[in-house]
Image (spheres, rainbow, N blue to C red):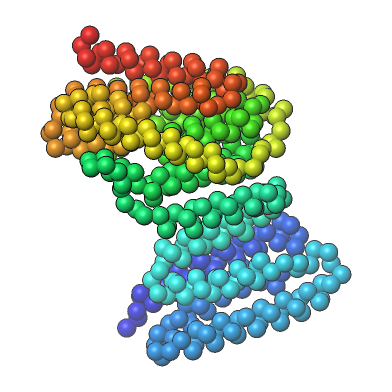
């Protein structure tokens, strides 16, 4: 009896090898290059990986798989040398080993198919396909990276990978105010620095204007406060980009409201209609203003240099982390000593420190029927108002002077929209 499961696995391995081989074949034709391994070779090697794994399973030994790997390695090595010698006078002859290394990976992907790791094999195939296809783009990015950039990356890796895991993940503080968590505080510091790296990479790849804009978009999805802090710090070192930073900051504030709305309706789907007005209306004028800034200053992006300063600045990130910790401590102290009776006051003070923390607390109380829907809406509005005012103050007190002027209309627009909604829901 035929075992269709066997043929299914072999067919998957065949398909993966065929796709990568097709890319390699097309690449040679497009660039007029030569290489002994093409579509058929990649397909056969992937199939060999699956068949060798099948034989290893039948025999209860890894010998067939290892033997297949060694044999293919020897064939690739000898063919590689012979082909290079044969085309020694051809400047377009084989100069690298990327295709040969890809051939080895294809052998392992074929093995993954046999062991039912089809999803993993397909993901690795897509990654390999991307690496092989965008050769010149990746080389261009590498050429733009300086020694200083590499040193900054190493420093960032040290503070995130070597310091963070060893900090205690435990809250400290007076009784009832155990909110000082070293792990959380340092995570915030790493996060601020990380946003700077994302921004720097985007700027290197697609240019200052678009890079800063996309940073605002993604930063708003993660933490608009951290994005604001990072952009404020960088504005002092790159004052000519004040308008670009303003666009990024205002955009992140708008995205924050959208993100908050999505979180709320995910946890409370029945509140989707009730929360749409209070959470999405404040984002509309700031979105419009952010796009206005982008199109108004669009022509300036081509005139600016992309020579940004070193993205790694640990000391400012630590200062921001300390400020964040102080505000968070004061807000939680107000919550403890004022009690739940002063819900709006606590939400306002808490929103000044961290909007998400307040939102999750309010959602939890609403799901437990501890607060009415009207109180939930008003508390979210007051928290959002405080959060916007806090981020605006960070810009005005810590940012470059050139950043304050374009940011002010964004702060005013969000505050006016939020206050109008507060008056509407309060019945005033």
> Residue placed farthest to the front in the image?
174
The residue most toward the right is 89
> Is any part of residue 230 visible from this angle?
yes
Q: Position of residue 219 (x, y in %)?
A: 47, 37
Residue 88: percent from left, percent from top: 84, 72
Residue at x-position 59% and y-position 25%: 400
Work out which quarter of the rendered image holds the C terminus and state it: top left
- In the picture as drawn, the residue positioned furthest to the left comes out as 369
For residue 95, side relative to residue 154 (left or right): right
The correct choice, above or below, for 225 with respect to 60 in the image is above
The residue sitting at 22% across, 33% down in the picture is 336
Residue drawn at point x = 38 percent, y = 48 percent: 182
| Residue 114 picture location, percent across and down | 42, 75
Q: Is 84 rendered above or below residue 164? A: below
Q: Is residue 8 visible?
A: no
- Give the number of callouts: 0
198 versus 107 height, above or below: above
The residue closer to the viewer here, 140 or 156, is: 156
Q: Is residue 182 left or right of residue 80?
A: left
| Quarter of the N terminus within the rendering | bottom left
Residue nearest the observer in this picture, 106 or 140: 140
Q: Is residue 406 above or below residue 364?
A: above
In this view, the residue in front, 2 or 241, is 241
Image point 52% across, 36% down: which residue?
A: 230
| Residue 33, position as x, y percentages in the image | 75, 63
Image side of residue 382 versus residue 94, left or right: left
């Amino acid at each position: 009896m035929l075992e269709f499961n066997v043929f299914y696995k072999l067919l998957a391995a065949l398909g993966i090898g065929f796709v990568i081989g097709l890319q390699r074949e097309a690449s040679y034709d497009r660039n007029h290059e030569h290489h002994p391994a093409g579509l058929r070779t990649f397909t056969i090697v992937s199939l060999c990986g699956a068949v060798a794994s099948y034989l290893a399973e039948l025999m209860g030994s890894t010998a067939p798989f290892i033997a297949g790997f060694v044999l293919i390695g020897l064939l690739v090595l000898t063919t590689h040398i012979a082909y290079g010698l044969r085309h020694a006078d051809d400047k377009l002859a084989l100069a690298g080993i990327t295709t040969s290394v890809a051939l080895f990976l294809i052998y392992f992907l074929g093995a993954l198919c046999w062991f039912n790791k089809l999803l993993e094999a397909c993901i690795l195939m897509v990654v390999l396909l991307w690496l092989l296809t965008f050769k010149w783009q990746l080389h261009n990015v590498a050429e733009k990276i300086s020694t200083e950039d590499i040193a900054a990356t190493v420093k960032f890796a040290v503070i995130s990978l070597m310091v963070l895991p060893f900090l205690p993940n435990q809250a400290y503080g007076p009784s009832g105010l155990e909110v000082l968590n070293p792990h959380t505080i340092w995570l915030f510091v790493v996060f601020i620095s990380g946003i700077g790296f994302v921004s720097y990479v985007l700027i290197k790849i697609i240019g200052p204007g678009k890079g800063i804009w996309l940073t605002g978009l993604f930063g708003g999805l993660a933490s608009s406060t951290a994005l604001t802090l990072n952009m404020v710090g960088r504005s002092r070192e790159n004052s000519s980009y004040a308008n670009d930073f303003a666009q990024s900051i205002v955009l992140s504030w708008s995205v924050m409201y959208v993100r908050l709305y999505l979180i709320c309706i995910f946890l409370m789907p029945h509140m989707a209609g009730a929360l749409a007005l209070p959470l999405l209306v404040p984002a509309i004028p700031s979105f419009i203003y952010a796009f206005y800034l982008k199109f108004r200053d669009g022509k300036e992006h081509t005139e600016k240099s992309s020579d940004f300063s070193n993205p790694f600045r640990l000391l400012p990130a630590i200062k921001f982390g300390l400020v964040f910790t102080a505000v968070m401590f004061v807000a939680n102290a107000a919550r403890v000593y004022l009690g739940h009776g002063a819900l709006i006051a606590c939400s306002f003070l808490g929103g000044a420190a961290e909007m998400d923390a307040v939102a999750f607390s309010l959602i939890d109380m609403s799901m437990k029927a501890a607060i009415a829907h009207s109180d939930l809406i008003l508390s979210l509005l007051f928290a959002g108002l405080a959060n916007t005012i806090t981020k605006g103050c960070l810009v005005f007190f810590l940012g470059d002077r050139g950043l304050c002027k374009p940011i002010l209309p964004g702060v005013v627009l969000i505050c006016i929209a939020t206050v109008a909604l507060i008056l509407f829901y309060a019945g005033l």
